[in-house]
């Protein structure tokens, strides 16, 4: 407060100030007492660029950076929406970029138990269409990133296959645009690199118990925790 | 300098900042920016660094406004303490204190120092009265008063004051301690 302490002493005091309200109160008292002494120093006009700098810095601050709790709640939602929009905007960016972006999402999307994430992208242009979130309690959540158009006489079927399985196993028919939770009761635990795909099948599903139609979206599980 | 600061409602301005009102921050800046810059410049002695610090102060005022508790101190005091702390931190980390150990300092010629103190005139120009603090400071001997002022206004450390006044470090520390106590008595 007076300014007489060395660098190390200042840091020590600052630590104490954070923990001791009585010390804080004493310092504040002294600062108010000595405040009139600031009048001993002549004012110096700031350069005209200083205020615009301040404005630019305020503009650059994320909403979550402010101390107001209300703003930070909005900020988390805003960041979430921005993530989704970023997501949807990915077209030629490629699977790798999408997978990397996916690594960030779990913090906002998933519960602490989430173990695997899968990005399902179209085979050709790699545009992402779905996110699969696989929880440790053997349930798989399928989250659409957009509205897929499925012909009236067709259905979208969800399959999964781990590397050492012979054939994919059906997880059921999925309604496009709907978020779905699929239990994996009768299957072994999820593995890294486990394949997930959505194929276009006849309306009542694949007649053979294996994928027959074209793959709409495909991806492999990436472990996130 | 007229006490125009008395008519500006700093507490209201801070509350408006907390409510996301940038115009309030601008008002604080217009009202206090020049004085803040002067105070900071006196401590850091570098105009560019001083402007950086005033910029950082504005940001800290903005982000901290909602946490300010008017029951615990004045808003104007809070604003200045932010600026001064940033300035002092910048200076403490930047300045390399010559590593005089206390023994070396106290080995200085005590007699010569004592005479120098007695000859000391005020190194600070006094403006017209700024309330009780001026009166109370005038009750101190010039040497002791200058210690307080060098510390507060110039941001000197104990060592730096000791070197400047050619006085033992221990004496400077004791003087400042006793002078602060005397000031507190006088001011309450």
Image (spheres, rainbow, N blue to C red):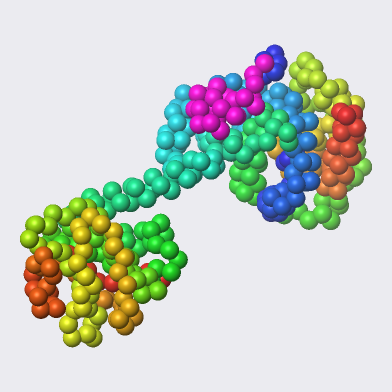
One can see residue B71 in this view: yes
Could you say which is closer to the camera, residue A124 or residue B97?
A124
Is A142 within the magenta? Answer: no
- Tell me where residue B83 appears, x and y as whole percent: 62, 35
**Side of B66 relative to B128 (left or right):** left
**Side of B112 relative to B79 (left or right):** right
Which residue corresponds to the image point at 62% horizontal and 39% vertical from the top-left? Answer: B67
**Side of A29 relative to B96 (left or right):** right
Q: Quadrant of residue A133?
A: bottom left
Is B18 within the magenta? Answer: yes
Magenta segment main secondary structure = helix
Q: Quadrant of residue B25?
A: top right
Quadrant containing the N terminus of chain B is top right
Which residue corresponds to the image point at 8% horizontal and 67% vertical from the top-left? Answer: A202
> Is residue B103 shown above or below B154?
below
Which residue corresponds to the image point at 53% horizontal and 43% vertical from the top-left? Answer: A69
Could you say which is closer to the camera, residue B41 or residue A180?
A180
> Is residue A63 shown above or below A123?
above
One can see residue A222 in this view: no
Could you say which is closer to the camera, residue A178 or residue B84?
A178
Which residue corresponds to the image point at 35% horizontal and 63% vertical from the top-left? Answer: A103
Q: Which residues are magenta?
A: B7-29
> Is residue B88 shown above or below A218?
above
- Tell me where residue B156 appears, x and y as whole percent: 72, 40
**Side of B134 relative to A136 (left or right):** right
- Tell me where residue A181 appears, x and y as whole percent: 31, 65
- Tell me where residue A223 appears, x and y as whole percent: 35, 72
Residue at the extreme front: A204
Quadrant containing the C terminus of chain B is top right
């Amino acid at each position: 407060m007076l300014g007489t302490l060395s660098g190390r002493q200042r840091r020590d005091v600052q630590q104490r100030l954070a923990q001791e309200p009585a010390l804080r109160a004493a310092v504040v008292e002294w600062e108010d007492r000595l405040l009139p002494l600031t009048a001993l120093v002549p004012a110096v006009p700031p350069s005209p660029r200083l205020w615009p700098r301040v404005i630019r810095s305020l503009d650059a601050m994320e909403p979550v950076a402010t101390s107001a709790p209300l703003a930070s709640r909005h900020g988390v939602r805003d960041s979430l929406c921005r993530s989704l929009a970023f997501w949807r905007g990915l077209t030629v960016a490629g699977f790798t970029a999408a997978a990397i972006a996916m690594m960030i999402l779990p913090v906002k999307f998933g519960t602490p138990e989430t173990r695997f994430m899968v990005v399902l992208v179209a085979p050709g242009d790699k545009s992402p269409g779905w996110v699969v979130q696989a929880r440790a309690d053997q349930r798989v959540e399928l989250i659409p990133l957009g509205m897929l158009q499925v012909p009236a006489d067709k259905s979208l079927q969800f399959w999964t296959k781990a590397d050492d399985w012979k054939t994919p196993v059906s997880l059921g028919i999925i309604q496009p645009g709907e978020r779905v939770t699929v239990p994996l009761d009768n299957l072994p635990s999820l593995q890294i690199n486990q394949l997930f795909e959505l194929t276009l099948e006849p309306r009542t599903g694949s007649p053979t118990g294996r994928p027959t139609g074209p793959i709409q979206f495909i991806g492999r599980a990436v472990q996130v925790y | 300098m007229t006490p125009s600061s008395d008519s500006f409602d700093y507490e209201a301005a801070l509350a408006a900042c907390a409510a996301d009102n940038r115009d309030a921050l601008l008002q604080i800046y217009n009202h206090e920016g020049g004085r803040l810059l002067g105070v900071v410049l006196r401590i850091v002695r570098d105009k560019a660094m001083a402007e950086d610090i005033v910029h950082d102060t504005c940001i800290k005022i903005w982000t901290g406004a909602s946490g300010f508790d008017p029951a615990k101190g004045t808003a104007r005091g809070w604003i200045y303490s932010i600026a001064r702390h940033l300035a002092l931190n910048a200076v403490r980390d930047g300045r390399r204190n010559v590593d005089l150990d206390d023994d070396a300092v106290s080995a200085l010629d005590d007699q010569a120092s004592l005479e120098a103190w007695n000859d000391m005139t005020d190194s600070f120009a006094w403006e017209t009265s700024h309330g009780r603090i001026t009166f109370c400071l005038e009750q101190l001997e010039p040497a002791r008063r200058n210690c307080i002022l060098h510390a507060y206004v110039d941001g000197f450390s104990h060592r730096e004051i000791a070197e400047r006044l050619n006085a033992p470090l221990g004496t400077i520390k004791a003087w400042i301690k006793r002078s602060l106590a005397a000031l507190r008595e006088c001011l309450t």
